[in-house]
Image: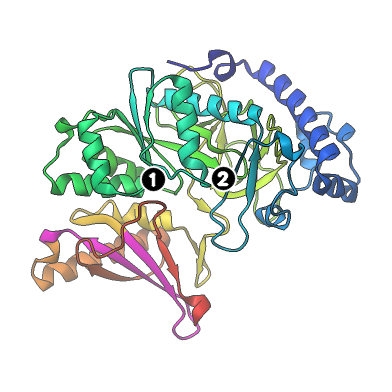
Amino acid sequence: MIWNEEAECMAPGEKTKLQLEKLQEVVERAYNNVPYYQKRFNEAGIGPEDIETLSDLEKIPFTTKADLRDAYPFGMFAVPPDDIVEVHTSSGTTGKPTVSGYTREDIRIWSEVMARALTMAGADKKDVIQNCYGYGLFTGGLGIHYGTQNVGATVIPISAGNTQRQVEILKDFQSSIITCTPSYALYLAEVLEKEGITGEDLNLKAGVFGAEMWTEEMREEIERRLHLDALNIYGLTEIIGPGVAQECMDKSGLHIFDDHFYPEIIDPQTLKTLPEGEKGELVLTTLTREGMPILRFRTRDITSLQSGECPCGRSLVKMDRITGRSDDMLKIRGVIVFPSQIERALLKIPGLEPHYQIIVTRPQHLDELEVHVEASPALFSDEVKHVEKAKEMIQKRIHDEIGLRVNVNLVEPESIPRSEGKAVRVVDKRKFD
């Protein structure tokens, strides 16, 4: 089933025409109503009238997270305060949070794109969706909530945390779709296994997992342990929240709802636009948001784009799975390393639990990587020589993946902290040295 066939299966020529019309409208709205954009346009020597084609988007300066923080709290709003009906923020863990304001029309758009996303996961009116994303200022919970209600399915607004209660609800309410971070899905699987609850005891058919990077190997692990289709969802507070893009059951990339969010890929060093298929940093422009239009937002997420009709019938442009972030990649002794590369190597090795942390230090002016990874109970209780052999195998697999030797520390089962939100995968101690 396709939620909005007209929008999701639009012919390329028709899509381009629609995108240009919406782009010209949003540029004019941003220029006339947001002082930040008027200032940036004037500095660049351009005006709304200079946007005559989609490629003219490249004339517009980028918007960064720092720009949004500088505008805290309401400096990026394009409508009077009375028209804002809802406000969300990012986590703000590294300074002021970014604020996102929504009009009634923005909430309708959010509900629409989330209905499309959930329909890709097989949702309809008969489904019970257990929403484990956090409610409140974080966009995850309410975004899923609005989409579920739009579809007409039953939403269980359980929010994040209280894992024992989550397990009880999964079983008793026979939830058919679960939404949470992939790391929390694995933690739930762990708890279910301890309580002797199997896939046959549950009614899960799909999971909508996002808010953190995860690999194809992690997908396979989740699907094996929870007996469902694990699908990737993508979004950002700055753009709208979850519902910017979603995987369909073909699992060959995430469909971007490009009638609402226009994507570009740039080289994060040169800032030049890259052609389709090349990997770089994703840049997004909101085409329809009223309350807070955002032009050319640098997401820092590394991916590539592909066009063409999907086997599911949709013609929406696809983005590949996020492989890292241009601002969280680790540079170790001159080599660029993404945490997802290490995860990919670890999940190929039997006898390991899918829980790990990467510790970065600089003991003597040289960066060092140490990977803490949980052994299975059987491996951890095995003879020392077997444990040492396992460590050597892990070091070799990681070396093959990233080209660097790393120190591996096999730790006891359940010793790495579990997260009910985003997992903390990297602990960078260099800044404290």
Residue type marked 2 = Lys
- From this view, report whether residue 370 is shown above or below residue 305: below
Label annotation for residue 279: 2
Q: Is residue 382 left or right of residue 81?
A: left
Report x, y in % for residue 40: 83, 49
The answer to whether residue 406 is visible is: yes
Q: CA distance from mark 2 to mark 1?
A: 24 Å
Which residue corresponds to the image point at 64% horizontal and 29% vertical from the top-left? 104
Residue nearest the observer in this picture, 159 or 214: 159
Report x, y in % for residue 198: 15, 37
Report x, y in % for residue 42: 90, 47
Q: Is residue 58 left or right of residue 421?
A: right
Residue nearest the observer in this picture, 366 or 221: 221
Q: Is residue 325 left or right of residue 394?
A: right
Residue nearest the observer in this picture, 176 or 246: 176
- Stretch of the chain drawn in magenta: 356-378
Q: Earlier in the sequence, mark 2 or mark 1?
A: 1
Looking at the rendering, which quadrant does residue 311 occupy? Answer: top left
Q: Secondary structure at mark 1?
A: loop
Q: Which one is closest to the eye, mark 2 or mark 1? A: 1
Which residue corresponds to the image point at 44% horizontal and 83% vertical from the top-left? 363
Q: Main secondary structure of the magenta part?
A: strand
From the image, tell me which residue sits under label 1. 181
Rate crowding at label 2 as few (under 14), some (14 to 19) or many (20 or more) other CA atoms within 10 Å: some
